[in-house]
Amino acid sequence: MQVSVDPGPIDPSVLTLQATHRSEDVWHGLDVQVDRCREHLRSIFHTGVDDRILHYVRLAGFYGVHRLVSTLHIDRALLTALLERWRQETHTFHLPVGEVTITLGDVAVLAGLPIEGRAVTGTACRLWVDLVHRLLGVRPHPGTDIRGSALRMAWLREHFVGLPADADDDVVQQYARAYILMLMGASTFADKSGNEVQVLYLPILESFDVAAVYS
């Protein structure tokens, strides 16, 4: 006797997008697009991050993110499997054991970031090129290096990989801000552009001690 198996959902009133979900193609044996995984910091980790930079990374509270990202191995098969379980309707993973999601507690344990403290609300600054120049010491070219508040990660890698041995403390701090900004663009605040980071977070890094009190 042939057994009929229904992959679900049993109740379509919540998971209303099943017809366009990638699991539908998987179930029917159709080719599924292989998603691209982007990685921005390999060139930095290949040469190592200077201890002088890591000093300020610790002060700003981002050493846990550095440690996580620098040792991270991208398992594309696992990510693909998780994508097939992700539901846009509920923003949770639907697994055989039930619904699961990433909590703030998970973020605190994995990334070492505080989950209590001042909220990151943005900035009133709109002179983005001047902001980058003031805090990083290099002026990006509008339109090519920076568009609005979106700064190209490639520009950061070009100017802030390889801290000079004779760099004074001001330059070290500029490199540290750039490195933390790259960490943000590659992990905590990654977006679908895949090659940009928002500089609206940069004012938080003006004082590394103050940055550490944000959640």
Image (cartoon, rainbow, N blue to C red):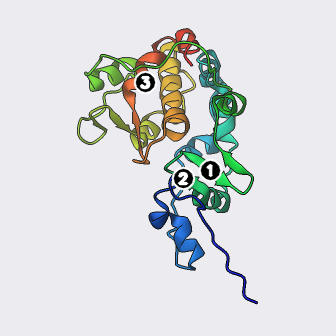
Q: Is residue 178 left or right of residue 53?
A: left
Q: Are marks 2 and 1 in contact (CB under 8 Å)?
A: yes
| CA gap, disc 1 and disc 3 | 29 Å
Image location of residue 203, percent across then percent down: 41, 17
Disc 2: which residue: 87
Q: Is residue 166 above or below residue 32?
A: above
Label 3, secondary structure: give it: helix
Comparing 14 with 172, the one in front is: 14
Q: Earlier in the sequence, mark 1 or mark 3?
A: 1
> Residue drawn 37% across and 25% down?
200
Q: Is residue 93 left or right of residue 130?
A: right
| CA gap, disc 3 and disc 2 | 29 Å
* Neighbours of disc 1 within 10 Å: few (<14), some (14-19), many (20+): some
> Residue drawn 52% across and 73% down?
25
* Neighbours of disc 3 within 10 Å: few (<14), some (14-19), many (20+): some
Going by the numbered disc 3, the residue's amino acid type is Tyr
Disc 3: which residue: 201
Disc 1: which residue: 93
Image location of residue 7, percent across then percent down: 63, 69
Where is residue 132, by image quadrant?
top left
Q: Is residue 135 left or right of residue 34?
A: left
Q: Is residue 86 above or below residue 57?
A: below
Image location of residue 17, percent across then percent down: 46, 59
Q: Quadrant of the C terminus?
A: top right
* Neighbours of disc 2 within 10 Å: few (<14), some (14-19), many (20+): some
Q: Earlier in the sequence, mark 3 or mark 2?
A: 2
How many labels sit on residues?
Answer: 3
Label 1, secondary structure: give it: strand
Q: Are marks 1 and 3 in contact (CB under 8 Å)?
A: no
Going by the numbered disc 2, the residue's amino acid type is Arg
Q: For marks 1 and 3, give the one nearer the viewer.
A: 1
Label 2, secondary structure: give it: strand
